[in-house]
């Protein structure tokens, strides 16, 4: 039986997106663990960071539903939500950590390890988000019905 190449591309895109969603979930769990484990007792959690985490978790669920059911509307909502979460994470990082102070203070390795992990997790999340945008856009383009030539 011959399968149209477009359907093969959709299947490949779905498997790539599955791996990216899993990677985003792992990164989000890492970021949440850093937030909860290294926040001093009695100090409140930052609302921006918590809202970014909630938005990302919800968008990951929506993305997984969109991937499994091949719904481009859910995939668009996933892209929007996960991109907003990534922007909020970067804004939180810039607001809370002075990056140039972190770079200058690398001589105090033990005290800045937590800050370095925060920066690395957010930057890794942004890189994965860029790949996710490319893969999801390609998947939605391949899921669309073919254009008929008139």
Image (cartoon, rainbow, N blue to C red):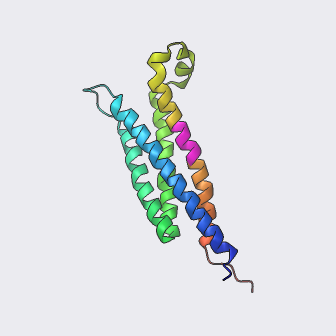
Specify whether 54 is left or right of 42.
right
Count of picture labels:
0
Q: Residue 46, position in %: x, y?
A: 35, 35
Front in this rendered view, residue 8 or 85: 8
* 149 part of magenta stretch: no
Residue at 61 percent of width and 58 percent of height: 135
Q: Is residue 140 above or below residue 92?
A: below
Q: Residue furthest front?
A: 1
Q: Residue 140, position in %: x, y?
A: 59, 67
Q: Quadrant of residue 29?
A: top left
Specify whether 69 is left or right of 41.
right
- Can you say which quadrant of the picture contains the N terminus? bottom right
Q: Residue 144, position in %: x, y?
A: 61, 74
Q: Residue furthest bottom?
A: 150
Q: Residue furthest right?
A: 150
Residue extent of the magenta highlight: 122-128
Q: Is residue 15 above or below residue 3?
A: above
Residue at 50 percent of width and 68 percent of height: 73
Residue at 61 percent of width and 64 percent of height: 12
How would you classify the magenta stretch by its main secondary structure?
helix
Q: Quadrant of residue 48?
A: top left
Residue at 44 percent of width and 17 percent of height: 111
Q: Is residue 133 above or below residue 127?
A: below
């Amino acid at each position: 039986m011959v399968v149209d190449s477009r359907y093969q591309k959709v299947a490949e895109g779905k498997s790539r997106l599955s791996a990216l969603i899993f990677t985003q979930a792992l990164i989000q769990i890492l970021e949440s663990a850093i937030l909860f484990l290294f926040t001093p007792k009695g100090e409140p959690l930052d609302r921006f960071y918590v809202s970014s985490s909630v938005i990302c978790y919800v968008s990951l669920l929506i993305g997984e539903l969109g991937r499994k059911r091949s719904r481009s509307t859910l995939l668009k909502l996933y892209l929007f939500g996960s991109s907003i979460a990534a922007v909020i994470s970067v804004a939180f990082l810039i607001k809370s950590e002075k990056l140039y102070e972190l770079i200058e203070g690398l001589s105090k390795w033990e005290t800045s390890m937590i800050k370095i992990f925060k920066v690395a997790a957010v930057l890794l999340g942004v890189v994965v988000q860029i790949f996710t945008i490319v893969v999801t856009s390609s998947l939605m383009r391949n899921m669309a019905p073919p254009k008929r030539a008139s």
